[in-house]
């Protein structure tokens, strides 16, 4: 059962590589020639732990191939995964241009039965549109005798842990109206299953909505805990104690209850907005989702607010160090990263920035430029002579830094910890002025 993944971004590349790892023959297709050339030479366009080695191994063993030719890749493949981007349009709705474009290409090239699988995050009813577009092309070719199925199979991969998530999924959601197709999909995923129960077969709309509902639920937890952290600060309660207090209830659970500087990345902000749009188009009000978004916008501004409270609105003459630019650890992704707004906010007010990140520096340079910002390869060098440090991403190497060295090199030992990484009492004892999110223990 050969497989073809269309789109070699995070999702397509991880999907294709993990299927190859399980012994399938996989073709990865992309229209970007440069990207395909690099992949053929073993150069991976993104940072994802474990991916590079896995691509290399499967390429060498002949199971993983890269091409710009969809017709070549499709020829012997039964499963065609659409894994192209669905970026947000100005009104927040998902832009389906790439998905529909791929569907059209499939329609032009399909010659025998295929299962076309939507892995991209797409609004409810997109499966129907994909089916319709392929059918239109078959009509033009007078080949409506060719059969195909369209399946929704959303991904739940976390960047930075995508391989692990793919190999050991909590669940696999398959949206199909065809029992036989459901069985084939189940068989395809069988190497990843610890027990059969993880495969959830449902109708296409339910699978499409599940993806948005899952991300929106997680985003809601984060905005909820961020709002509670504000109440902690105002009341003297401690968010860590409250987190343990509520998370110990098995109905609530511990994960995804860390207060911070707001959620970022390519998924939560975009998917919450897209779900709001879909609901509004359907005439359904979205009071909770609107609030989730508003709380997140406010939370992204919190650290700049804290800095302004201490130093005033005019920050010229002040230099601040930033540790962490990526939206979370173990990725070089900076899409919707809180660091973008925080750094821009500080630079607008006249501050100078010394920025460090273990791997996102070149991405940051492209997004933020050099105006007012100096990039450092070493996180301690970034601290030299600064007024304060702002910790924005909880990378492992920031977790237990050499505090004595920090005290020596910083102009004034002040830390704004956007990720609650250090012990407030110890920081005070060591002589730091320490600000964090909702911790008052
Ligand atoms: C998210 C989902 O977790 C995946 O299941 C989903 O497949 C993916 O979106 C997607 O739709 O493709 P991802 O965006 O990679 O994955 O990252 P997360 O680990 O979920 O983190 C998202 C944001 O929430 C980060 O900015 C993180 O710092 C923040 N966060 C997370 C918190 O502020 N507090 C928490 O307790 C957890």
Image (spheres, rainbow, N blue to C red):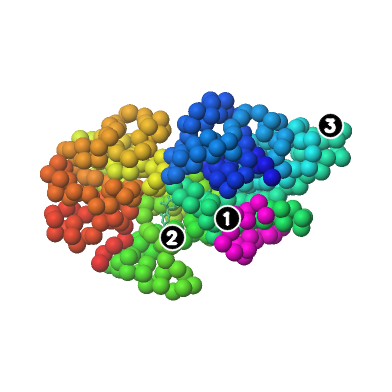
Q: CA distance from mark 3 to mark 1?
A: 39 Å
Q: Is mark 2 within 8 Å of ligand 1?
A: yes
Q: Which numbered disc, 3 or 1, marks the residue that appears first in the sequence?
A: 3
Element class at badge 3: helix
What type of secondary structure mainly makes up the magenta span? helix
Position of 315 with respect to 289 (left or right) is left
Which labelled disc corresponds to residue 52? none
Q: Which numbered disc, 1 or 2, marks the residue that appears first in the sequence?
A: 1
Which labelled disc corresponds to residue 256? 2
Residue drawn 15% across the image and 45% down it: 405
Q: Is mark 1 within 8 Å of ligand 1?
A: no
Using the image, determine if residue 391 lies above or below residue 429.
above
| Residue 205 is a magenta residue | yes
Residue drawn 62% across the image and 28% down it: 68
Quadrant containing the N terminus in the rendered view? top right
Element class at badge 2: loop
Q: Is residue 192 visible to the viewer in this orientation of the structure?
A: yes
Q: Which residue is mark 3?
A: 140
Q: Which stretch did the figure color magenta?
A: 187-213
């Amino acid at each position: 059962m050969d497989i073809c993944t269309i789109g070699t971004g995070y999702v397509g590349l991880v999907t294709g590589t993990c299927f190859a790892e399980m012994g399938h023959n996989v073709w990865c297709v992309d229209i970007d020639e440069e990207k395909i050339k690099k992949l053929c030479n073993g150069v991976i366009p993104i940072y994802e732990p474990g991916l590079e080695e896995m691509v290399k191994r499967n390429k060498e063993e002949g199971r993983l191939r890269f091409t710009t030719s969809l017709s070549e890749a499709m020829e012997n493949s039964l499963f065609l995964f659409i894994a192209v981007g669905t970026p947000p349009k100005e009104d927040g709705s998902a832009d389906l241009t790439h998905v529909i474009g791929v569907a059209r290409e499939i329609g032009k090239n399909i010659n025998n039965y295929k299962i076309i699988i939507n892995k991209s995050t797409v609004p409810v009813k997109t499966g129907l549109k994909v089916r319709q577009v392929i059918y239109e092309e078959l009509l033009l070719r007078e080949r409506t005798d060719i059969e195909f199925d369209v399946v929704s199979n959303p991904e739940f991969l976390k960047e930075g842990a995508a391989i692990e998530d793919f190999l050991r999924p909590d669940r696999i959601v398959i949206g199909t109206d065809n029992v036989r197709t459901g069985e084939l999909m189940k068989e395809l995923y069988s190497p990843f299953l610890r027990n059969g129960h993880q495969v959830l077969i449902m109708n296409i709309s339910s699978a499409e909505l599940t993806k948005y509902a899952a991300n929106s639920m997680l985003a809601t937890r984060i905005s909820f805990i961020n709002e509670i952290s504000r109440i902690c600060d105002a009341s003297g309660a401690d968010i860590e104690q409250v987190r343990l207090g509520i998370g110990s209830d098995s109905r609530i659970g511990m994960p995804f209850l860390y207060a911070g500087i707001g959620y970022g990345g390519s998924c939560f902000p975009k998917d919450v907005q897209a779900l709001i749009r879909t609901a509004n188009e359907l005439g359904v009000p979205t009071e909770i989702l609107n609030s989730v978004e508003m709380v997140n916008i406010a939370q992204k501004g919190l650290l700049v607010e804290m800095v302004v409270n201490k130093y005033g609105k005019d920050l010229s003459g002040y230099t601040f160090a930033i540790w962490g630019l990526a939206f979370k650890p173990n990725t070089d992704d900076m899409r919707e990263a809180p660091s973008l707004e925080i750094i821009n906010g500080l630079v607008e007010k006249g501050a100078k920035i010394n920025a460090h990140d273990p791997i996102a520096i070149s991405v940051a340079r492209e997004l933020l430029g050099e105006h007012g910002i100096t990039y450092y390869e070493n996180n301690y060098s970034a601290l030299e002579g600064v007024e304060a440090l702002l910790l924005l991403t909880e990378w492992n190497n920031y977790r237990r830094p050499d505090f004595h060295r920090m005290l020596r090199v910083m102009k004034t030992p002040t830390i704004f910890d956007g990720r609650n990484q250090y012990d407030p009492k110890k920081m005070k004892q060591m002589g730091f002025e320490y600000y964090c999110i909702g911790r008052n223990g």
